[in-house]
Amino acid sequence: MLDLNQVIMEDLENVSRRDIDWEKFRNAAVLVTGANGLIATYITYLLLYLNDTRGLGVHVIGLARNPEKVKAKYGSLLEREDFEMVYQDVTKPLQVEGAIDYIIHTASPTGPKQFMGAPVDTILANVAGTYQLLEAAREKESRGFLLLSTREIYGSGSKDFVTEGDYGAVDPTLVRSCYPEGKRMSETLCAAYNAQYGMGCKVVRIAHTYGPGMLLRDGRVVGDFLGNVVDGKDITMNSDGSGTLALTYIGDVLAGIMQVICNFQDFVYNISNSTETTSVKELANTLCGLFPEKGISPRFQPASEQERAGYLANKLGFLDSAKAMAEGWEQKTPLAEGMRRTVRYFSGQ
């Protein structure tokens, strides 16, 4: 039986109670790429939890490059018979024997520091990686393929909230565009495989996901701010704090991904908080207020040239998730509750 941090166990139980057709996974082999990432880790935990609580008999296959990170993250779970790890670069032909019923592709750099430090790797993880996995899914006649994408594919536009049919511009000559352009092509590959081979590919676009196990101090606002809270340090803003965020707790994103795989019929869905936005300054003030015992305050420090190079050149719209909500997805975790849960996890409670 899973024995994880209490916050994570509560999240898994809450998601398992949602109206999702879990029988789709019965006795299925499910490959999850990017196994060390936040969302992939939660997907893996959830499938193992469903084995323990519902006897689904899922065979979970994780794919990652770094065995040491995997050992640190999963520990004794690697000894389970229903869980195996494959160590390889996602851009290479998949080295997995036997059937794979579902592929969930989350592997990709996700932070500005990673984009700017390895833009070629970022492109290849998305484009070449998606191609190799689609080929594997086609050859193995997989039942489902889900690509995790991003709100950045929408590019810049005039709308505050974008639906699945709204698209703006992305400057392909900017190095920073390696991420959205890579994701755009990976989505097009999925659409092409659906059209040419009749595959059942689906896409979930997300934005600003946070929660237990996320990367702290990674150059992104939420990870840096929460790292400051955990460390008991003042929250440092590298701007005037006027930028806005729509943050979605990992439990809600996880539920949305599973509903898209098991319940929803269309090709692409936004899964993101569409009802609660906050400015960077408001987030800093909220975190300081939620944890008064930390004795921390917000402060301003100008961004370095390297940090500014990783910023988005244009304002992006938030994701309008009305389509997913109309089919049954709910964003259930308010910002304050999600932040408390995340800090509680990192505090070992």
Image (cartoon, rainbow, N blue to C red):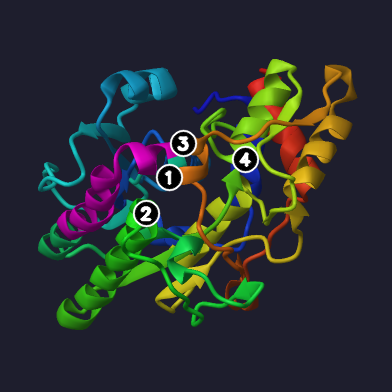
* Residue 217 in the image, given as x and y percentages of width and height: 56, 28
Q: Nearer the viewer, mark 2 or mark 3?
A: 3
Residue picked out by circle 2: 179
Q: Residues within 10 Å of mark 2 (few under 14, many from 20)?
A: many
Residue picked out by circle 1: 110
Question: Which region is colored magenta?
Answer: 113-133
Q: Residues within 10 Å of mark 1 (few under 14, many from 20)?
A: some
Rounded to the nearest angstrom, the CA distance separating label 1 from label 4 is 13 Å
Residue drawn at (23%, 69%) of the image:
189
Q: Earlier in the sequence, mark 1 or mark 2?
A: 1
Q: Are marks 3 and 4 in contact (CB under 8 Å)?
A: no
Could you say which quadrant of the image residue 202 lies in? Answer: bottom left
Residue 47 visible, this orientation = no
Mark sitting on residue 306: 3
Residue picked out by circle 4: 221
**In magenta stretch: residue 220:** no
* Residue 248 in the image, given as x and y percentages of width and height: 64, 52
